[in-house]
Amino acid sequence: MNGNKLLLDTNAIISHLNGSKKLEIVLEGCTIFISSITYTELFSFAKLSVVDLQLLKAYVAELQIVHTNNFICDIAAEIRRKTKVKLPDALVAATSIYLDVPIITFDTDFEKIDNIRILKFSE
């Protein structure tokens, strides 16, 4: 997938950090985006050690963080009206749609959303 652009959901990043070889192969050479929501979720885990925080900071420094804007919020609101998915998932999905890039996630709630391209993985 060299040269491609992808958006990663929080669970995909955790899987990647845990050593998923499948993800490593898919992500090689890609421009990787994350939503600011994903960024927040990553750093909000209560049991992160100092080493974990350093690892996460180094990891996300290599990614393109997409901050929520009015367009993403409008898309997310429409997703919520139609599907009732959780707000964080709606915002991450809206980011994928706004950027027009596929999302890598293990979350099946994203399958309820129209106009989103999902690269499904199983752990």
Image: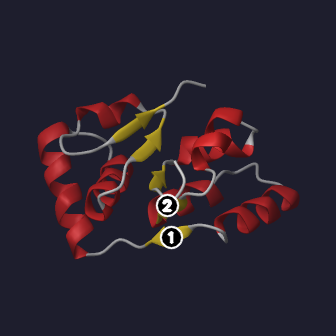
- Residue lying at the far right in this picture: please name it: 51
> Is 68 situated left or right of 123 in this image?
left
Give amino acid for label 2: Ile
Q: Are marks 2 and 1 in contact (CB under 8 Å)?
A: yes
Q: Nearer the viewer, residue 23 or 57?
A: 23
> Is 37 situated left or right of 79 in this image?
right
- Residue lying at the far top in this picture: please name it: 122
Label 2 secondary element: strand
Q: Which residue is mark 1?
A: 65
Q: Residue at x 28, y 40 (%)?
A: 85
Image position, residue 76 (x, y; %):
23, 56
Give amino acid for label 1: Ile
Q: Which residue is mark 2?
A: 34
Q: Nearer the viewer, residue 27 or 114?
A: 27
Q: Residues within 10 Å of mark 1 (few under 14, many from 20)?
A: some
Label 1 secondary element: strand
> Is 6 situated left or right of 81 in this image?
right
Q: Residue at x 42, y 37 (%)?
A: 119
Above or below, comparing residue 29 to residue 73 in the picture: above
Residue 17's tag is none
Q: Quadrant of the C terminus?
A: top right
Q: Residue at x 70, y 51 (%)?
A: 46
Image position, residue 17 (x, y; %):
72, 46
Image position, residue 20 (x, y; %):
70, 35
